[in-house]
Image (tube, grey):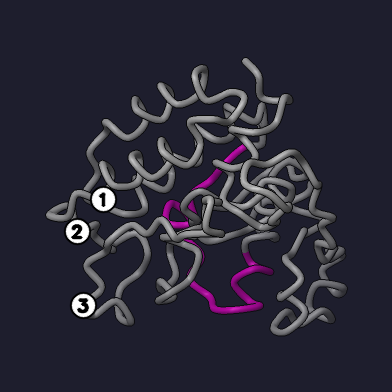
Amino acid sequence: MVLTIHQPSYLPWLGYFDKISRSDIYIFLDSVQLEKNSYSYRNKIKTSQGTTWLTIPLKLKGHTSKLIQDVLIDNSQQWKKKHLKSIYYNYKKSPFFDQLYPKLECLYEEEYDLFSDLSYEHLMFWLKELNIQTKVVKSSNLSVDSKKSDLILDLCKSFNANMYISGAQGKDYLVEDDFISNSIEIEYQDYKHPVYSQLYGGFISHLGIIDYWMNSHQYDK
């Protein structure tokens, strides 16, 4: 049983989906605190001037004491219209725009108050588009409340995982001996980002999934 864990992410980069696609179970980690200025609620797209952020406005007052599952979206701002407009103008010349953009319009019609709900439903959309069938489980639905390395270990044990795929940053906080003693192998992701055709000159990696989706023939549906 191969397991991976990650906090919610808006328009995740390709490496996020790489971990999920190589796992049997993905834990949607919404039972921890939100990190301000993280990629959880923002990501980059490519423009003719370089890159720009698309950010979901959140009600972050007191966020250090809130779990991701409780964080509210500030829907008083017209952020969905702004994001769709930015995607439209920057990707309307991409090869699969006409087939794909209407799907985004439908996706963004849905209204969510909770950031975690939006993130989860958007994740389900992207997994379907990328034909990734990994089982997704919300950590908020599990009875695990440990912290840091112990949290990861306990989640792995909950599903009898024998391998955990970690991001490269996991080396900074995972207590590897605890995993070894529980017969759980850790694989640190070493993702080789593909180079694909993009608009606007030289290639830029580590963008939100929108860029790859709009430009790659693999998703010509």
- Where's residue 69, x and y in %? 34, 59
Q: Nearer the viewer, residue 96 or 103?
A: 96
Q: Amino acid at mark 3?
A: Lys
Q: Nearer the viewer, mark 3 or mark 1?
A: 1
Q: What mark, if any, has residue 58 been given in the picture?
A: none
| Neighbourhood count class around disc 3 (C-alpha, 10 Å): few under 14, some 14–19, many 20 upward | few
Query: Callout 2: helix, strand or loop?
Result: loop
Asked if 219 appears above or below 206 in the picture, the reply is above
Does residue 195 show up magenta in the picture?
no
Magenta residue span = 135-154
Q: CA distance from mark 3 to mark 2?
A: 11 Å
Q: Is residue 44 left or right of residue 162?
A: left
Query: Callout 1: helix, strand or loop?
Result: helix
Q: Is residue 151 left or right of residue 167?
A: left
Asked if 158 appears above or below 168 in the picture, the reply is above
Residue farthest left in this picture: 76
Mark 3–mark 1 CB contact (< 8 Å) = no
Q: Badge 3 is on which residue?
A: 61
Q: Badge 1 is on which residue?
A: 79
- Where's residue 5, x and y in %? 63, 58
Q: Badge 2 is on which residue?
A: 74
| Neighbourhood count class around disc 1 (C-alpha, 10 Å): few under 14, some 14–19, many 20 upward | some
Residue at coordinates 61% horizontally, 34% vertically from top-left?
213
Q: Earlier in the sequence, mark 3 or mark 1?
A: 3
Residue at coordinates 66% horizontally, 24% vertically from top-left?
219
Residue at coordinates 87% horizontally, 73% vertically from top-left?
180
Mark 1–mark 2 CB contact (< 8 Å) = yes
Q: Amino acid at mark 2?
A: Asp
Q: Nearer the viewer, residue 61 or 173?
A: 61
